[in-house]
Image: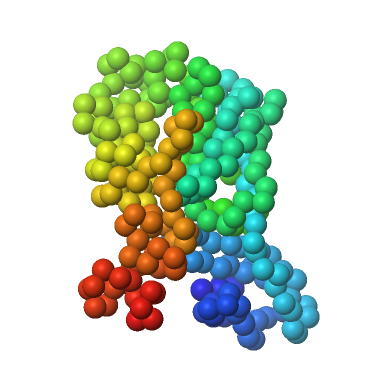
Amino acid sequence: MVAVPFSRVSAQVKADGSFTLRRIPRGARRLVAGVAGVGTVQRTLPLDDPDIEVPAVTSASLSGRLAQRGAGPVSGATVTLQFGDLVLSAASDGAGEFSFTDVPPGVYRLLATADGLAPLAVPHVPVGAELELPPLVLGALADGDQDGDGVGDAADEDDDNDGEPDATDDFPGDRHEWRDSDGDQVGDNWDNCPAEPNNEAGADAIPRQPDADRDGVGDDCDNCPDHPNPNQGDSDGDGIGDACEGG
């Protein structure tokens, strides 16, 4: 779906990726394109010409800044973007800033790690066109209070403050994850196959879950792995997705 916010102008995207919007009021307008399981792309265009062609968005960029809680910028940190089996990495500079360019549009998991600091995971980061993240704050491991709630980890029954006690939390240091149903070291909230172990992590231990069609459903549990079908529709219940059967 492609739409112009605060108007009634919208259109469905055709199979070849093209779309046509009609009767758009002139002036600078924000165009928003969204795909389930992939995310959104936004672009502001000057619509002074009655007939304008929008260039295809095939790559995007993301930037941000890391800071330590109660201190200054975090330099030399490793920032990783992960989607399926695609892994991209960047380092923060002296000002704590990092950036990624030429990133395929999609929804990524961001992980920031630095010596002496608690890792910071941010799931479901929609990367489309240009995205600047708000400052990301990392806590010190040495201060014994990972979640910064004023209760030391030794006495805190929920170190990451996610509502799941450490005793039953599969990821006690990650406030976005608490369960790993298939035991593949990828939390259910991000796992593209939560009931099927499919983590092909390398020596760097970064999760890699193959997703050939990039629809957010891993190949091992995708009922149509070569055609994007995030809703996994299967009208006849034969285990083969409608997208592969023309249904």
Q: Residue at position x 30%, y 14% from top? A: 154
For this rendering, which residue is in front, 163 or 202?
202
Q: Residue at position x 28%, y 21% from top? A: 156
Residue 120 appears in the figure: no
- The relative height of residue 118 versus residue 189 in the rendered view (above or below) is above
Residue 96 position within the rendered picture, expressed as x and y whole percent measured from the top left = 64, 29
For this rendering, which residue is in front, 106 or 9?
106
Residue 46 position within the rendered picture, expressed as x and y whole percent measured from the top left = 75, 71
For this rendering, which residue is in front, 44 or 6?
44
Q: Residue at position x 34%, y 36% from top? A: 185
Apparent side of residue 155 relative to residue 1 in the rendered image (left or right): left
Residue 241 appears in the figure: yes
- The relative height of residue 216 versus residue 145 in the rendered view (above or below) is below
Residue 101 position within the rendered picture, expressed as x and y whole percent measured from the top left = 67, 47
Residue 121 position within the rendered picture, expressed as x and y whole percent measured from the top left = 45, 36
Q: Residue at position x 57%, y 42% from top? A: 88
Q: How many marks?
A: 0
Question: What colour scheme was applied to this rendering of the protein?
Answer: rainbow
Q: Quadrant of the C terminus?
A: bottom left
Which residue in the rendered view is the most extreme toward the right? 49
